[in-house]
Image: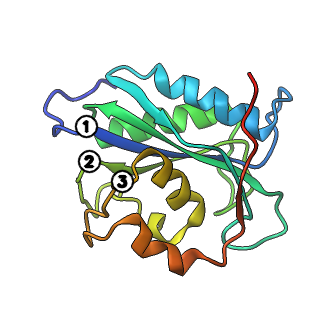
Amino acid sequence: MTMLQSAPALNDITIAVGANLPRESGETAAETCLWAVDRLARLPGLSVVAVSRWYESAPVPPSGQPPYVNGVVRLSGRVDPAWLLARLHDIEAEAGRRRTVVNAARPLDLDIITMGDLVRAAPDPVLPHPRATGRAFVLLPLRDVMPDWRDPVTGRGIDAFLPAVAGQEITPMPARAD
C-alpha cells in the first residue's frame, strides 16, 4: 500500500467530511469532523490548503436520522485515487464507522469529491463524485474552499448547480472559538 509515483499531476483534491453520530469514545460529530481534518493533514504526499466553514444539514435523502455536520477540505498533492480512497476508509474505520446499509447514520463519512480535473467512471473511486453537484452539503462548503471550481464533466461552475439544491436544509454553524 504505497503511493504510486506514476499518478497524474493532481494539485487540487477535495474531500467532503460529514458525521451525524457521536464516536464510541464520546466525541461529538463536530469534534469528529475536526479530528478527521487532522488525520487528512497527516496523509503522506498531501497537505491541507483550506477547510470550509462547517454546516449543519438534513440527511439526503430525507430520513429520521440526526442532522449532519458537513464541510470540505481542500488538499494539495499527488496521490493515486485508489490509494487515497483506501486511506479515507482507514480513517473512517478508526472513527468507528461500520458499513451496514446505504445512507446509514455514521460517526464519519469521507468522500473524494474531485482530484483535479480527473474524470473516471471506473474503477472506484468514480471521479468527480457522481452525486456531488446534487447536494447542497457538498456545494456550499466546496464554494468556501474553491469558489471558482468547475465540474470537469460539464464545465459548469458551482453557482449553476445551486438552484437545483435550494430546497435542501443546510445552515452554516457558528465558528468555533478554539
Secondary structure of the residue carrying tag 2 is: loop
- Residue 11: mark: 1
Picture coordinates of residue 178 (x, y %)?
74, 21
Picture coordinates of residue 30 (x, y %)?
74, 38
What amino acid type is highlighted by mark number 1? Asn
- Residue 116: mark: 2
Which residue in the rendered view is the most extreme toward the left? 6
Q: Nearer the viewer, residue 97 or 118?
A: 118
Label 1 vs 2, first from the N-terminus: 1
Secondary structure of the residue carrying tag 3 is: loop
Picture coordinates of residue 79 (x, y %)?
28, 33
| CA separation in Å, label 1 and label 3 | 20 Å
Q: Is residue 88 left or right of residue 126?
A: right
Q: Quadrant of the N terminus?
A: top left
Residue shown at 71% from the left, 33% from the top:
32
Q: Are marks 1 and 2 in contact (CB under 8 Å)?
A: yes
What amino acid type is highlighted by mark number 3? Asp
